[in-house]
Amino acid sequence: MLIVGVLGVVIIYGGFLFLLFSGRSTAALPWFLLLSPWICVYFGLSHVQQVAVISWFANKFSFRKSSK
């Protein structure tokens, strides 16, 4: 699943960037098309790595003030 996800990221984002930089419209691409390979990457990780990803997102996007 991890390999499929990584290949999906490369292929889908490569195609998206090609369309974007060639001046063609990307309006026909649904937003979830760009997210779907990351779901495969996530489920390709081990359970410990999945928990670490969730923890990282929780820390990254929490709105608590940091005590720096």
Image (tube, grey):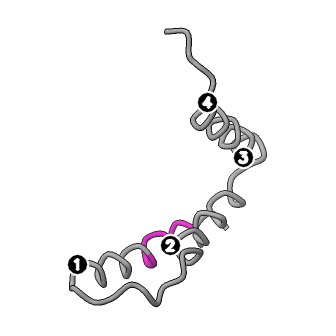
SS class, disc 3: helix
Which numbered disc flags the more N-terminal residue, 4 or 3? 3
Q: Is residue 21 magenta?
A: no
Give the mark nearer the N terminus: 3 vs 2. 2
Taking the view exactly as shown, the residue that stands out farthest to the left is 22
- Total tally of numbered discs in the picture: 4
Secondary structure of the residue carrying numbered label 2: helix
Kind of residue sitting beneath label 3: Gln
**Image side of residue 18 versus residue 26, left or right:** left
* Residue reaching furthest to the top: 68
Task: Give neighbour class at mark 4: few <14, some 14-19, many 20+ (Cα, 10 Å).
Answer: few
Residue 7: mark: 2
Which quarter of the picture shows residue 19?
A: bottom left
Q: Earlier in the sequence, mark 1 or mark 4?
A: 1
- The alpha-carbon separation of the residues under discs 2 and 1 comes to 21 Å
Please state which amino acid type lies under the numbered disc 1: Phe
Find the distance from the CA under tag 1 to the CA under tag 4. 35 Å
Where is residue 56 shown, x and y percent of the image? 62, 36
Circle 2 Cα neighbour tier, 10 Å, few/some/many (<14 / 14–19 / ≥20): some
Q: Which residue: 46% across, 90% down?
A: 28
45 or 68, which lies in front? Answer: 68
**Residue tagged 3:** 50
What's the magenta region? 5-12
